[in-house]
C-alpha cells in the first residue's frame, strides 16, 4: 500500500495548492525584503533631512538632504550683544543634533554660552540639542549654510514669528 505524504495528498485533491504555496513564498520573501529595507534605512546614516519650519502656521519652509557628520552653520547678529555670531552644528545618527563651534568677535557672546573663547574668537563645544527654536524681530541677518547652499531667513516668516530648525530621519526630503 502506498503511503501518501502530506504534499502528495494536497497536490492530488487541491488543484490550486501549488499556486497557493508559491504565493505564500512570495509573500514571505516580500516581507523579508521590506524588513531588511527598514532595518537598513535605520542603520545607515544616509537618511537625514535638515528642516526649517514655521510654527504658526506649521509648515515646512526649507528641507535639504544632510549627509551624516556634515557640519552646517547658522549665522546671525546676537540679539543682546549686537555682534555677529556663527554657530556650527553637526548631526550624528544616534546622538542627534550637536552644536560643535561658536565664532564671534564679541566676548559677550561667549559669556552667553558659558564658554571661554580661544584667541581667534572661536570656541569648540559639544552640546546635544533638540530642535532649535529661533525668534527674531528682524531676520535680515539670519542665514543657514549647508554645504554650498545658503538659505536666507528674511521673508520665510514675518519678523517676530518663530522658526524651528531640526533634523528628521526620513528617507525623503521635501523639495
Image (spheres, rainbow, N blue to C red):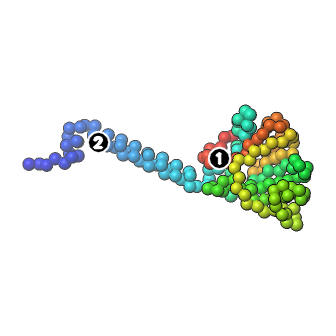
Residue to which mark 2 is pinned: 18
Seen as rendered, the residue at the extreme left is 1
Image quarter (top left, top right, bottom left or bottom right) of the C terminus: top right
Left or right position of 83 against 41: right
Mark closer to the observer (1, 2): 1
Q: Is 170 placed above or below 86 here?
A: above
Which of 50 and 57 lies nearest the eye of the viewer?
57
Q: Residues within 10 Å of mark 2 (few under 14, many from 20)?
A: few
- For label 2, the SS is helix
User: Is residue 168 at least partly visible in the picture?
Assistant: yes
Q: Residue at x 85, y 49 (%)?
A: 76
Q: Are marks 1 and 2 in contact (CB under 8 Å)?
A: no
Residue 26 position, x and y percent, is: 39, 44
Residue to which mark 1 is pinned: 168
Q: Which quarter of the figure has residue 160?
A: top right
* Disc 1/disc 2 C-alpha distance (Å): 45 Å
Left or right position of 115 against 172: right
Q: Residue at x 58, y 55 (%)?
A: 44
Which of 26 and 71 lies nearest the eye of the viewer?
71
Q: Residue at x 56, y 52 (%)?
A: 42
Residue 104 position, x and y percent, is: 87, 57
- For label 1, the SS is strand
Q: Residues within 10 Å of mark 1 (few under 14, many from 20)?
A: many
Seen as rendered, the residue at the extreme bottom is 119
Amino acid at each position: 500500500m502506498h503511503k501518501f505524504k502530506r504534499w502528495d495528498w494536497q497536490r492530488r485533491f487541491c488543484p490550486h495548492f501549488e499556486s497557493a504555496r508559491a504565493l505564500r513564498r512570495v509573500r514571505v520573501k516580500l516581507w523579508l525584503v521590506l524588513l531588511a529595507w527598514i532595518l537598513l534605512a535605520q542603520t545607515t546614516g544616509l537618511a537625514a533631512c535638515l528642516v526649517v519650519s514655521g510654527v504658526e502656521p506649521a509648515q515646512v519652509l526649507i528641507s535639504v538632504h544632510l549627509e551624516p557628520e556634515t557640519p552646517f552653520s547658522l549665522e546671525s547678529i546676537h540679539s543682546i550683544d549686537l555682534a555677529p555670531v556663527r554657530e556650527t552644528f553637526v548631526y550624528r545618527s544616534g546622538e542627534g543634533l550637536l552644536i560643535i563651534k561658536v565664532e564671534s568677535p564679541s566676548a559677550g557672546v561667549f559669556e552667553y554660552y558659558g564658554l571661554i573663547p580661544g584667541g581667534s574668537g572661536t570656541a569648540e563645544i559639544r552640546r546635544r540639542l533638540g530642535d532649535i527654536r529661533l525668534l527674531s524681530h528682524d531676520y535680515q541677518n539670519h542665514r543657514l549654510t549647508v554645504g554650498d547652499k545658503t538659505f536666507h531667513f528674511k521673508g520665510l516668516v514675518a519678523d517676530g514669528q518663530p522658526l524651528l530648525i531640526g533634523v528628521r530621519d526620513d528617507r525623503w526630503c521635501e523639495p
